[in-house]
Image: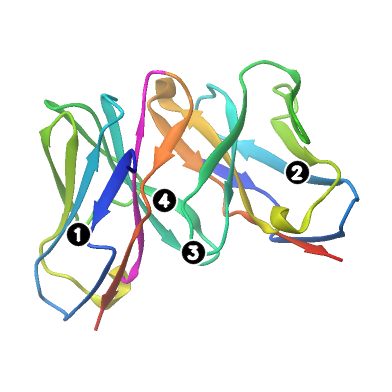
Amino acid sequence: GQSLEQPSEVTAVEGAIVQINCTYQTSGFYGLSWYQQHDGGAPTFLSYNGLDGLEETGRFSSFLSRSDSYGYLLLQELQMKDSASYFCAVRDEGGFKTIFGAGTRLFVKA
Amino acid sequence: DADVTQTPRNRITKTGKRIMLECSQTKGHDRMYWYRQDPGLGLRLIYYSFDVKDINKGEISDGYSVSRQAQAKFSLSLESAIPNQTALYFCATSDEYNEQFFGPGTRLTVL
C-alpha cells in the first residue's frame, strides 16, 4: 500500500530549530514535497526534493534519503508565524498522482 | 486576483441533494486536481485531470464525479450528498513540475 508517516504534533519555542520527519512507502517515487497550511488557509508549496540531499530555501531546508524512504523539513529561527500544519507529499505512479501525509501541526511558543 | 478560485466558499446542504463545486484557474496549467481534507487525514485525492479529455480517479472517487469543461475549469459533483462527505474541498493546479497551487477551499456541510 501507499502511506506517508509524519508526527501529528510538534512544539518548539521561538528562535529555535525544529525538524519534521516523514517516512514513505509508495508504489513509485518521483520526489518528496513539503507544503505549509495555516488555519483556515490553503496549502502552499515550500520545497521539493527529487534527489538525495539537502535543499535550502531561506530559513527552511528539506532533506531526502531515497534509500531510507525518508525525508525531513528543517525550520530554523522559528517565528510565531511558522505555527501551522506541514504536509509531506510524494509524487507516485509515474509522477501523475500526489499522495499527502496526514500533516504535522507545529506550535511555536514565545 | 487569485490564480485559483473556488465557488462556493461555504455550502450547507441536505442528504440526497446534488451539489456542484466549481474551480477556475488563470495560471494556464493543464493539470487540475480535487482533494478532500478531513481533520487528521491530510489531503486525499478525489479526481485529477491532465487535459480536457483526460480524467482519472484518485484515492476516494466513490460518490463523486467531475467535469473538465475547459482547460481553466474543473467541477466536482456530489450526485447525492451524504453526511460523511462533510469536509473541506480543495482544487489545485500544476504544470508538469512539482508545485501545486491550491484554491481557497470550499467548506461543505451535509446535514
Labels 2, 3: front one: 3
Residue A40 is labelled as: 3
Residue B101, image x and y in percent?
A: 41, 37
Quadrant position of the C terminus of chain B in the picture: bottom left
Q: Chain of mark 4?
A: B
Q: Amino acid at mark 4?
A: Arg
Residue A54, image x and y in percent?
A: 77, 22
Q: Is residue A1 visible?
A: no
Classify 10 Å Cα crowding around label 2: few (below 14), some (14-19), many (20 and above): some
Q: Is residue B2 left or right of residue B55?
A: right
Any magenta on residue B80? no
At 26% from the left edge and 32% from the top edge, which residue is drawn? B26
At 29% from the left edge and 25% from the top edge, which residue is drawn? B29
The residue pinned by badge 2 equals: A21
Residues marked 3 and 1, same chain: no
Determine contact: label 3, label 1, CB under 8 Å.
no
Classify 10 Å Cα crowding around label 1: few (below 14), some (14-19), many (20 and above): few
The residue pinned by badge 4 equals: B44
Q: Amino acid at mark 1?
A: Gly
Q: Chain of mark 1?
A: B
The residue segment tinted magenta is: B86-96
In the image, farthest residue toward the front: B1
> Dividing the picture into quarters, in which one does residue B31 lie?
top left
Labels 3, 1: front one: 3
Local SS, label 2:
strand
Q: Chain of mark 3?
A: A
Q: Amino acid at mark 2?
A: Asn
The span from disc 4 to disc 3 (Cα, nearest Å) is: 17 Å
